[in-house]
Each structure stands twice: as structure tokens, then as C-alpha cells.
Amino acid sequence: MKEQLQQLLIVSLEALLAEGVIAEIPTQIRLDHTKDKTHGDYATNIALILAKQAKCAPKVLAEKIIAKIGDSSLVNKTEIAGPGFINFFLSEASNSAVVTDILASAEDYGLSNVGEGKRVLLEFVSANPTGPLHVGHGRSAAYGATVANLMRAVGFAVDNEYYVNDAGRQMDILTVSIFLRYLEVFGEDLRFPDNGYQGEYIKDIAKSVVAEHGERWRKNADELFEDICKDEAEGGDKEAHIDAIIKRSKRLLGEGYQAVFRVGINSILGGIKDDLAEFGVDYQQWFSEQSLIDDGLAKSTTETLQETGHIYEKDGALWFKTTDYGDEKDRVVVRENGIHTYFASDIAYHLEKFDRGYDKVINIWGADHHGYIARVKASIAALNHDPEKLEILLVQFANLYRGGKKVQMSTRSGSFVTLEELRNEVGNDAARFFYVLRKSEQHMDFDLDLAKSKTNENPVFYIQYAHARICSVFRQAGEKGVTVNSSDADLSLLIEGSEKALLKELNRYKSVIESSALQYEPHQLAYYLRELATNFHSYYNACPFLVDDDALTQARLALIKACKQVLVNGLSLLGVGAPESM
């Protein structure tokens, strides 16, 4: 319906263009659903946009636009509101026509080609493979997967990518953490470092090293810790302590160091892949940070920037002049010890992304990475790419509540709730829905008790219950021998207030999908589905569907069948199921 109204506006504006009233027609004509029913079904601000070039008041231009539209079976009436908004009141026939459209398109209803097949690379989650995914990562996973679904629904070609941070110091800390637990299996008495990874999963991986390599890499703990500087709890420096253990472990183990590392990375990354797949999150590519180093791209990219004057040497280190691009200070890309920083790898990674020829590159990062945006965009500009092609979407951490109390979490100490544990407790559907129920940049409180409840206060239960109720109506129809013939239903019989409200809500679906996709805001769809469910439940309580009048029965069944289809389509985009009974 929106597309048809827009076409009416285009025809009107073309007529005014031919008469010289306006000089040009905008490529985008905004037409929005009205929130207040007294303002009609749709409204446009086109008269305000074009008033200056028309050299007349917006209200005067609005009158001219309406006059050129003339009579249309789509529109019951038009009104000019405020400074020059045009409000459209749809005819009953055009409002109910949405039922026919939905039933004809079925699972394809709501799809469009707004994206025109443009290629998008969407990178999200990309958690360090130092442990299992926790509930904070779950929010990024649900958000990223849903944004991808929505963008594909409106015609973008989206590839999901996970950047595996399998190089650098955190990987060394992981490796020595596993190695120390490995030594403990053989009875070696040692003090585990304050800065090591403390979780039970480290002990499990250590047992896997034993299973694969036996005692091959066993070393004497006294030899490992001899003359090692004190840890923080001992009055020393925890960073220097763990770095010394890393250096000593590499020397003692030799090739065994990489063997321990491989068991660890394979175990953790395998768990992450399984966890995400079970959560309904799929990736087209898994990109290794180590590959940038192995292929020499991190080194060559740094050299290119140095040759073009974007990098300078200071105190034995190499610095990127990111202040030239608005960053608050310059950033180190190669430390004085010759080791490339994480930023150096990130520059090379983004260069590699852009070289793949995507029309748009989107990164979904934790909100704590906000300060990182300027330096990454600086590197893109320095490498002669358009930084505007990169969009950064930020996701706030999720706070978990159980019994009204906040669950405390720390990845390093191992005291956290994993995504797998969350999914097992509340189910995938509740987890996926709750994660996208707020704007991604807003803090969210995940109430476990609410997510598990079977009440109307639980939004996902409330929406799924609407779908199950519709399925129940059709089961009852079958039991009563009612033959459903929605294609020939007389939709003009849908005149009750609750029917009109439901029709108006169904008419909004396409616009909601487009807006959710283009603004990267899945919560718009989540809220819409809750409103649709509310309208259906009101209809369910107000009107019987299986009545003595067969024509009215068929009309009402057609309406709720269309509602059922939209619920299925919308929930599917959110990664949520639509159960037929509850």
C-alpha cells in the first residue's frame, strides 16, 4: 500500500514539474505511518521539503499536490495538517487488500529490493578465543544475526564474518594458563598466576593436552618459575610476572608451546562455532588474525603507511599519525621490541576487507571500543579508501538478573554465565528476542525470571501465544468440518473496530521491515510484533471467528491467517520460532 501511495505522489509531482511549479522531484519521498489514528494512515512532509523551490507556502503546495492526485480508490480522504503535512486516510478496500497480498506472498511477504543487491560485509561477535562465549557476547550475536537477516530481507547481499583474534599476547596468556594446568595434572606444585585464565574450562583443555600428548611436554615447575619476578598478590607486577612465564615457557617447551596452543585454540574456537550455530547464528567466513601475520600483510601495510609519511619512529617504536585524521593522539603500530600491535593487525584486516570489493563494511563492536573508531577510519583514509564505506555499530553489555539480583561476571576469573548456560536456562527463542528488545547502544538488563515466565508480561511468550492461538482456531475449524477458502473471502465484511485495527497493523509490516533494516534497529520489529500480537489478542477476545455466517467466517479466518503469516515472517527474521501450541 505504501508503494502505491508513493506512486500517486510521484505522478502528482511529475504533473507539477511539467507545469513548472517545482524544479525537481526528490529521489526519496518520505511516507510514514501515522501514530495517531486521527491523522489518518500515512503522512508525508513532501510539501515542506519542496516549498522553497516552489516559492510558496508549504500548505499552498500541499493543496496543489492533493489536487493533482485527484480521486483514487486507495484513498478515502486527504487532510493538510500543521505547517503542511499531507495526511492520507485509506479506503476500507485498500486497507483490507493487505490480507490478499499477504496470503499471496506467504513467506516472501515483506521482502523488497531496497538494497539493490549491494554487497555488505558484516563482522560481529569476534570475541577473543580465550574462553567460551558469555552472555555479553550473546547480545552481539543476536543483534548481528538479526541485522543480517533484515538487510537480506530488503535486498542486500550480506556476508557474515567472524574475526578470530588468534595472535598476540592474549593467546600467549591462554597458552601458559593451559600449560600450567597441564603440569598440575601430573602433580606439579605451582602457584597459578593472578593474570592467568582461571576458568574450569582451562583445566578441561589441559586434560585434552594430556590425552593428545601424554607427558611429552611435562616440565619441572621449579625450573619454570626459577627467578621469575613476583606476582601482584606477592607484592609484584602481574603483567611482568605473566610475561616472564610466557618467555620461560616458550624457551622450555620449544615446539611444544605451539602444540599446547593448538589444542587450546581448536577446543575454544570449536566450542564458539558450535555455540553460535546452535544459537542460529551462521557465518560465511572465519578470518584468522594470524593469517595477516603469516601472509605478511600486517608488515607490508605498515611499510606502505611508513613510505607515505603516515608513520614515524619515536623511542624505538613506530607510530601512526592518527591525529592527522581527528584522533586524540597518535597510536603505536610496532612496539620497540619489533612486535606489531593489535592496531597494526586491525589496519591490515580492514585493508583486506576493502580490497574484497564490498559496497559497505559494517563492524559491530562492544561499546567500550568507541574510542577505537577514529583511528580505524584514519587508517582507511590513509590507505586511500573511503572511510564512509565503513559503519561501526556499538552494542552495550548485557546485565544479567536472577531473582532480582545482578549476576556478577568476570571473564578472567572464570566467574561468568556462558551463552550456552543462558540458552539452556531460558531457551534460544527468549534469548534471541530479549537481546534485540532494546536499542543496541542502550544498556540492557536481562531478567532471567521474566524470560522463563509463561505470562503476558513476557513479550516473546505473548507473541508466540498469539500464533499458537491462531493455529488453535484452525484446528477447531477442521474439527467442525469448516473448509477454509481464504482466496475467495469477502474482506468487505471486516467492519468491526478490532478488525480494522488489526488490518492497519498488518499494513505497517513492510515499512517496519525496511526501517528496521536501514536503521540497523531490530527492536523496531520486536516492538511491532508485540503490537500486532496485542491487536490479535484484542480481536480474539472481541469477536468469534467460527460463526453461523459462512462468508463472515471465511473473512475472519482469512484475516487471522494473514496475521499468522506476518507473525511467522517477523519472528523468523528475529531468529525466533513460532510454535503451533503452547
Image: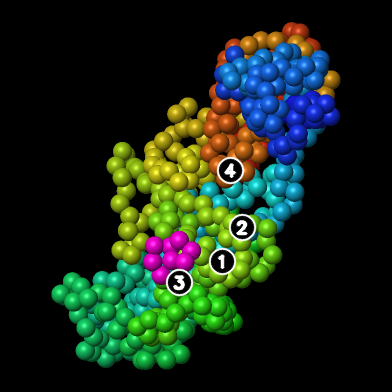
Type of amino acid at the residue the image marks with label 3? Lys
What residue did someone put label 4 on? 519
Is tag 4's residue or tag 1's residue first in the polypeptide sequence?
A: 1
- Looking at the picture, tell me which residue is in the foreground, 582 or 284: 284
Main SS type for the magenta part? loop
- Mark 3 vs mark 2, foreground winner is 3
In the displayed structure image, the side of residue 17 where residue 429 appears, left or right: left
Range of magenta residues: 323-330
What residue did someone put label 1 on? 380
- Mark 3 vs mark 4, foreground winner is 3
The image quarter containing residue 353 is bottom right
Does dot 3 land on a helix, a strand or a loop? loop
The image quarter containing residue 526 is top right
Give residue 389's mark: 2
- Disc 1 to disc 3, C-alpha distance: 13 Å
- Disc 3 to disc 4, C-alpha distance: 32 Å
- Disc 3 to disc 2, C-alpha distance: 21 Å
> Residue 212, percent across and down?
48, 81
Which quadrant is home to the C terminus?
top right
Q: Is residue 160 above or below residue 21?
A: below
In the displayed structure image, the side of residue 335 where residue 296 appears, left or right: right
